[in-house]
Amino acid sequence: MTGFTLTLWLMLPLAWLLSGERFLDWAYGMPDLGPVDDILLSLLDGADRLRVSSGLGDVFGALRARLHGWTGLGGM
């Protein structure tokens, strides 16, 4: 069980990074950097479109829902 828990915690940042929703939340919350943020937002938006078109979906959301189901936290 320790190996599972350790692996889970190590993989959560990766799942978070694969979630386009998290990328966009982070990007739109950035301070205004002039033309730099426009480029970054375009890159993030393009990456999110690529993720959606590849069929990956919201990996972090799916993992969170599964963990909540396994631990009985789904009703919270």
Image: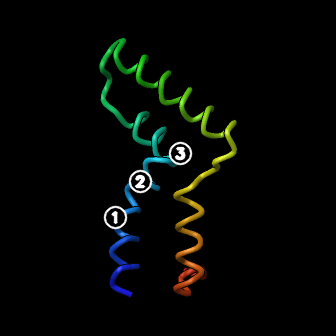
Q: How far apart are labels 2 and 3 at the CA level?
A: 14 Å
Amino acid type indicated by mark 2: Leu
Quarter of image, res 70: bottom right
Question: Residue drawn 37% across and 71% down?
Answer: 7
Tell me the residue at 58%/70% (across/down). Answer: 65
Amino acid at the residue labelled 3: Glu
Residue position marked by numbered label 1 in the rendering: 10
Q: Position of residue 41 (x, y in %)?
A: 46, 25
Foreground label between 1 and 3: 1
Label 1 sits on a secondary structure element that is helix
Q: Could you tell me which secondary element the residue under label 3 belongs to?
A: helix
Please name the residue shown 54% across and 80% down the image. Answer: 76
Q: Nearer the viewer, mark 2 or mark 3?
A: 2
* Tag 1: amino acid: Leu
> What residue would you read off at disc 3?
21
Q: Position of residue 1 (x, y in %)?
A: 39, 87
**Residue assigned mark 2:** 14
Q: Report the front residue among 46 and 29.
A: 46
Which label number is shown at residue 54?
Answer: none
Instruction: Residue at 33% x, 14% y: name it.
Output: 34
31 relative to 38 in the view: left or right:
left
